[in-house]
Each structure stands twice: as C-alpha cells, then as structure tokens.
Amino acid sequence: MTSAPQTPPPGRTDDELAQSDIPAMLRYGLSFAGPHRTALFGDGAVGAAVLLDRLGIQPRAVAFLAKVVRSGGVRYAAELPEPVPGEEAVSMVRAWLESAATAANGIDGDEETARWMEAVAELLGLRHAHRARAAGASSS
C-alpha cells in the first residue's frame, strides 16, 4: 500500500498560538483523550509558554507549580495566593488551574495537569535557551 505524500501542516505564529483558548483546551484535553489531548499538549502547551514568556515568567516557576499540582492537586494549586510571580500571570495561570480543576478527576487528572505544566515549563526553557543562543551569536 502506498500512501500519498503528506504535506506538513502550516506552522502557526507565536501570536496565533498565544490567542488559543487555553482554559477550554485544558477542559477538553483533560476530559478526552485523542485529538483534544494532543491539541492540549501541542498547541496548548506552546501557546501557554508563549504567554508566560511574554510576561517574563521563568521555567522554574512553572516546573515548581507542576510539583505543587502533583503533590496537592490542581484544586489546591488554584487556591494559592500567587501560583506564579506577577499579577497578570497570576490571573492567567489561576484561570488555567480553575479550568483544569473542573476536568481533572482525582489523582490521574492531577498527574495529567502536572505533566502538561511540565511540558509548558520545558517549552518555556527552550524559548529562553534559544533566545540566549541567538543573542550570543549576534554579539559575536
């Protein structure tokens, strides 16, 4: 069986990814496996990383929050007074956590949410590393 050549999907810009409805992606991605979960861990994680990067959030803050979610649960994390530094980031991340809390069922849901947050932290770290390399290359 031969398959037709696959055309890669068109890329999305940072601005397009940043406009993703992250709370909805969390609700559906945590509730349903398959394409919803794929979208959450793909475009949703990248969009979240773009938004947090624009607010100057460090990857370690998101990685730490993932540990809090894993240890105390997503509902507990949503009630933290400052889940990440910065007023605007707090508001945004709290909305994500509250949305995740409506869909995360028990320990498995908390674990899936923590994994997503770890993915966001990794992507955020990659953005920081790439920017640092690009700055180093341009100053040479």
Image (tube, rainbow, N blue to C red):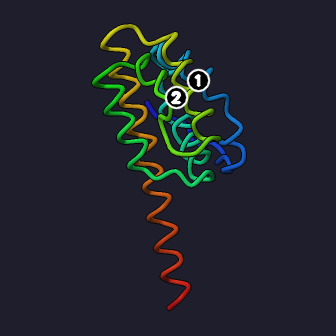
Q: Are marks 1 and 2 in contact (CB under 8 Å)?
A: yes
Q: 90 or 135: which is nearer to us? A: 90
Could you say where residue 63 lies in the image, as x and y percent from the top left? 37, 42
x 63%, y 53%: residue: 54
The circle on residue 62 is none
Q: Earlier in the sequence, mark 1 or mark 2?
A: 1
- The answer to whether 62 appears left or right of 42 in the picture is left
Could you say where residue 128 lies in the image, as x and y percent from the top left? 48, 61
User: Relative to residue 47, is residue 113 depicted above or below?
Assistant: above
Query: What residue occupies the far left of the structure in this picture?
Result: 71
* Helix, strand or loop under label 2: helix
* Helix, strand or loop under label 1: helix
Badge 2 crowding class, 10 Å Cα cut-off, few under 14, some 14 to 19, many 20 or more, is: many
Badge 1 crowding class, 10 Å Cα cut-off, few under 14, some 14 to 19, many 20 or more, is: many
Specify the amino acid type for callout 1.
Answer: Met
x 35%, y 40%: residue: 64
Residue placed under numbered mark 1 in the picture: 25
Could you say where residue 56 lies in the image, as x and y percent from the top left? 56, 55
User: Relative to residue 125, is residue 129 depicted above or below?
Assistant: below
- The answer to whether 36 appears left or right of 115 in the picture is right
x 51%, y 36%: residue: 42
x 51%, y 37%: residue: 45
The circle on residue 40 is 2
Could you say where residue 36 lies in the image, as x and y percent from the top left? 53, 20
Specify the amino acid type for callout 2.
Answer: Leu
Question: Is any atom of residue 5 visible in this view?
Answer: no
Looking at the rendered image, the quarter that the N terminus falls into is top left
Q: 13 or 70: which is nearer to us? A: 70
Number of marks in the image?
2
Question: Is any atom of residue 122 visible in this view?
Answer: yes
